[in-house]
Amino acid sequence: MMKVLHPGIYTSVQDKGRFGFAKMGIPLAGSLDAFSAAIGNTLLMNHKSDALIEVTFGLAKFEFTSDTFISITGADFCPKLNDDFLEMETVYEVKNGAILSFGKRNYGARTYIAVQGGIQSTAVLKSKSFSNQITSKFRLEKGDLLPIMPQKELDNRKVFKMEFFKEHFISKEIECFPGPEFDLLTDVQKEQLLETFTVSEDNNRVGYRLHEVLENELEPILTSAVLPGTVQLTPSGKLIILMRDCQVTGGYPRILQLSDYAISRLSQKVAGDKVMFDLV
Amino acid sequence: MKKYNLSYKPFGETAILIEWPSKIDASIIEDIIGFEKLIRKDQKVLETVIAYNSLLIRYEFMHNYSLHYKYHDSFAKAVEKLKQIYQQKQNVKKQESKLWQIPVCYDVAFGLDLVAISEEKECSIEDIIDLHTHPNYLIYFLGFQPGFLYLGGLNPLIHIPRKASPRLRVEKGSVGIGGEQTGVYPQDSAGGWNLIGKSPIDFFNIQKPQPCFAKAGDFIQFEAIDLETFYQISEEVNNGEYKSKFIWI
């Protein structure tokens, strides 16, 4: 088991998400930085759909009540196992009674704790991802117990560490494609889209609102499908980039669509960080 | 059933958005629902999202078709296949639909805006209830929140603009009118619709194998019940004894 000693600011269990239920209006959910989550699972030879713990802005603290292996990927908040600092993207053995905690921020916003075999919490509609109104809770609380698998030997591998992919955390560039309403934009709007944007305070698992304002006279559209990574142009001229907890439909023009990887990159940005759309 | 001129657009790396003419129209949604069924029969898709005039098809990321812009050919191939499926779509005789009967208590205890509406529209509360319970509302699709039904068919006499400032808390089951739309809040939430009543039944229950009883293409009708019946049904819902009622039409 893993026991939550301190849930931090926003900590949840996430896997690849809840596919196939959009028809009931159910959001996808899943690890925001799916790229870093996949590295965590790969290091431990887990299945790629295994569930991890997503910690937003550090502070969280856990106690292990059985032996296992773990790896920490994504944002670096100076992870510590008991009194020892841990390196990122590295496999560590953890003993019963060990305390995992996070401290000062070095980079990023979301940290992933992968555990050998994956977190074994209850699946709802085929996914373990926490989601408001779907799972019994949408964030972890103090005292919560998370089941994990009995420890197994790690097979004979040389790789217990992966190289840090710096671009993922420092690059401003967000790869995207034209969205369904891209062609409705004026030439001026298209030019403005190539400028630098700033992530606002209003950023979370549902969406990232950007600070700058585009001139905009576009009418709302008839309610239609949206996806994580859809960039909506609101009547005020502000842009919202939808993230994995977004609704399944929306009424604002969808002017850009982020690549799957770009969603991961964006999810490590914090208020004040700069982004630039790299239109493919 | 007529065939429409559809547009096919790539939507990110793994999805295609198919669009019908931009209007709210029962025969369009019928065409979309029929097409979606055929696509699901023919292809392995990860997810579909139906809305008023659009259908999103999301493929597996590692699907044979990579829809990445750098591979225009694959997108073109996928669209070609979809077009074939649409062409083969027969003018099937419209099948019977389910008409769900939804109990609603239009007591002013729940219909917090009933009095204001009757003053504004210069009609009695009974008239509002008659107008609201009369139609068979078509379920266009589900979205916004888990279990929220987008309904068509509200009588224009009771179209009422959304409230200027939304209520911070609207109780689950509340029935409201917002502009040309009417609907039921499936969960407690903030909301700007004018409230006219409350239904004791669950529109979304994650504990059930089928969390939503209704689906796009079904119809619903509201049935007025009194307070006593409301509490009686509430209890049946809480005990898990209530079964959603429908008839075939």
Image (cartoon, helix red, strand yellow):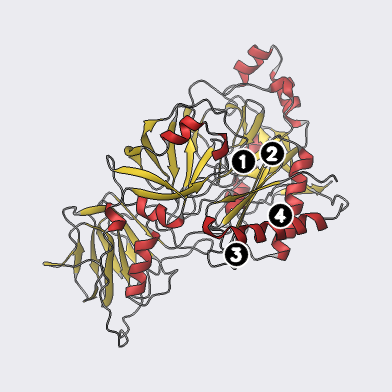
Q: Disc 4, disc 3: CB below 8 Å?
A: no
- The residue at which mark 3 appears reads as B65
- Identified by mark 2, the residue type is Pro
In this rendering, position of residue A162 left or right of residue B50: left
Which numbered tag is attached to residue B2?
Answer: none
Q: Residue at x 60, y 21 (%)?
A: B161
From what the image shows, is residue A92 above or below residue B59? Answer: below
Dot 2 or dot 3, earlier in sequence: 3
Label 4 or label 2, whichever lies nearer to me, is 4
SS type, badge 1: loop
Mark nearer the N terminus (4 vs 3): 4
x, y percent for residue B53: 68, 41
- The three-letter code of the residue at mark 4 reads Glu
**Residue B53 visible in this rendered orientation of the protein:** yes
Q: Position of residue A164 (x, y in %)?
A: 25, 65
Of pointers 4 and 2, the one earlier in the residue sequence = 4
Q: Secondary structure at mark 2?
A: strand
Label 1: few (<14), some or many (≥20) within 10 Å?
Answer: many
Measure how far apart labels 1 and 3 are at the Cα level.
46 Å
Label 4: which secondary element:
helix
Cβ atoms under marks 1 and 3 closer than 8 Å: no
Q: Going from the N terminus, do you reach mark 2 or mark 1 first?
A: 2
Which chain's residue wears label 2?
B
Query: Which chain's residue wears label 3?
Result: B
Neighbor class of circle 4 (other Cα within 10 Å; few <14, some 14-19, many 20+) is some
Mark 3 Cα shell of 10 Å, populated few (<14), some (14-19), many (≥20): some
What label sits on residue B200 in the rendered view?
1
Q: Which residue is mark 4?
A: B36
Marks 4 & 2, CB-CB < 8 Å contact: no
Q: Residue at image x 59%, y 27%?
A: B195
Return the residue at label 2: B103
